[in-house]
Amino acid sequence: MIDMTNIEDELKRFYAENTPPIDPDEKHRVVEMVARASQKDSSAPTAESISFRRFVLTQVRFINPICWILQIALIACVLITGDIYKASEIQAPLVMTFAMLTVVIAIPSAFKSFESKTAELELACRFNSAQVLASRLIIFGLADVLWFSIIIAAMPSFATSDPFSIFLYASTPFFLFCALCFYLARIANRHVTRAAIAAATVLVVVLWQSIGLFPHWYSELSWGTWMIALVLSIALAAFELRRLIGDMSFAIAPSCAHSVR
């Protein structure tokens, strides 16, 4: 049996006897030379000088164009369906369904790096996985403002609801479903798209069944109740988003997130 202690002692003795003495003047000269070279390199334009705003814009080209096509097609379907079926019991669930589906369409592109198993690579980049996710959510958030504006402006022209009602029917389920998707992203990780599709399917079925069982339940709620629901949904979405972006370890493996904490 090999005595590892003796081997370690012999190695320490060997390196101690064969290590040349350090010249303080030479050491100081080398340190100054490295510092000057580092300062010179840092002054040169590099990829690290890119601002986050510019980085957000560059993320647009990494989003699959099919995503935008599906978003526009969804708006067209909602407007056409709303024009054909003008009954008030159709308008509200139609807008609520639109709000959830527009989130589902954005999920694959927003969480592409995690599902394609490249998140570990992004963690070592100038802008890490959390910033990539944040930038894509900003892009989709701005796009959703445009989509919602189109729906809010167009629906009242052939529906009995006013623009403010359309806004509440769209925004409240939108933020609630965003919160659910952010939660699913933390626990489902690389299967977030399938989890979001499954959740949307269940919620859409429940929504339309509730309309059949309790017609006009949405209009029977007071504006105060709707506003409280909207504020709570925004707060919940912000809370889940903060947890999602703050938990960088979930990008590697969902089981590591809790152990790292």
Image (spheres, rainbow, N blue to C red):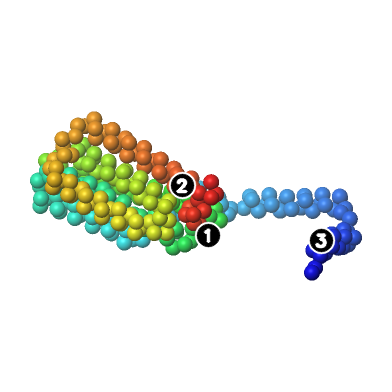
Whole-percent x and y of residue 94? 18, 49
Quadrant that contains the N terminus: bottom right
The tag earlier along the polypeptide, 1 or 3, is: 3
Residue, disc 3: 5
Whole-percent x and y of residue 182? 38, 48
Q: Residues within 10 Å of mark 3 (few under 14, many from 20)?
A: few
Q: Is residue 60 above or below residue 230?
A: below
| Residue drawn at (89%, 55%) of the image | 21
Spatial CA distance of label 1 from label 2 is: 17 Å
Amino acid at circle 3: Thr
Q: Residues within 10 Å of mark 1 (few under 14, many from 20)?
A: few
Looking at the image, is mark 2 or mark 3 nearer the viewer? 3
| Residue drawn at (81%, 61%) of the image | 5
Front in this rendered view, residue 164 or 117: 117
Q: Quadrant of residue 213?
A: top left
Residue, disc 2: 245
Residue, disc 1: 121
Spatial CA distance of label 2 from label 3 is: 47 Å
